[in-house]
Amino acid sequence: AGSACDMPADEQDEQSRAPEEQVRWILHKAWKSFISCASGCRRFVRAFLVQRSRSVERCMALVVLANGAVLAAEIELRAHGDHAAQQQAETVANPFFNALFTLEAVLKLWALGRKRYVASSANVFDGAVLLLTLSADAMLL
């Protein structure tokens, strides 16, 4: 075993602290690591959204079209009186699409920040539609 002189300063500091101070110190170090990681993730997501914005927009357009097709199918099932199939489609598809749209909005809001997010009228529109949809779904529960 090495002496205290052989230990890095962080380990010497940790060993010389009282147990409750050690917990605070460890939590502080963990929080700093988390913030550093989150900042790196935020930069990655922002770069992905900016550099790949055309690909991301195309992908989300496909998701919107798929959602529209599922909604049309639900309406058709209801019109033909197949309420069981229509109900099953609603219970699976609606939460799935709502989760995708929510994830997109949250990632954009997180990566771009509030000011840059609301600077785009498309983001404001998407956010408003998402909030209305989630509110309507919550009222139906």
Image (tube, rainbow, N blue to C red):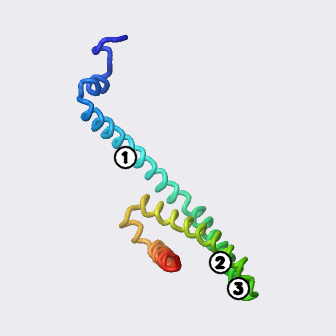
| Res 122 seen here | no
Residue 13's disc number: none
**How far across and how far down the image is residue 53, in percent?**
54, 62
Which of 138/73 is in front? 138
Q: Is residue 53 above or below residue 133?
A: above
Residue 71 x %, y %: 66, 79
The three-letter code of the residue at mark 2 reads Gly
Q: Is residue 91 above or below residue 1?
A: below
Q: Which badge, 3 or 2, is on the more N-terminal residue?
A: 2
- Tell me the CA gap for discs 2 and 1: 39 Å
Q: Residue at x 65, y 77 (%)?
A: 68
Q: Measured along the vertical axis of the image, is residue 91 above or below residue 17?
A: below
Residue sitting at 28 percent across and 24 percent down? Answer: 15
Residue identified by numbered label 3 = 78
Query: Which residue in the protein does label 1 denote?
Result: 35
Q: How many marks?
A: 3
- The reply to whether residue 39 is in sight is yes
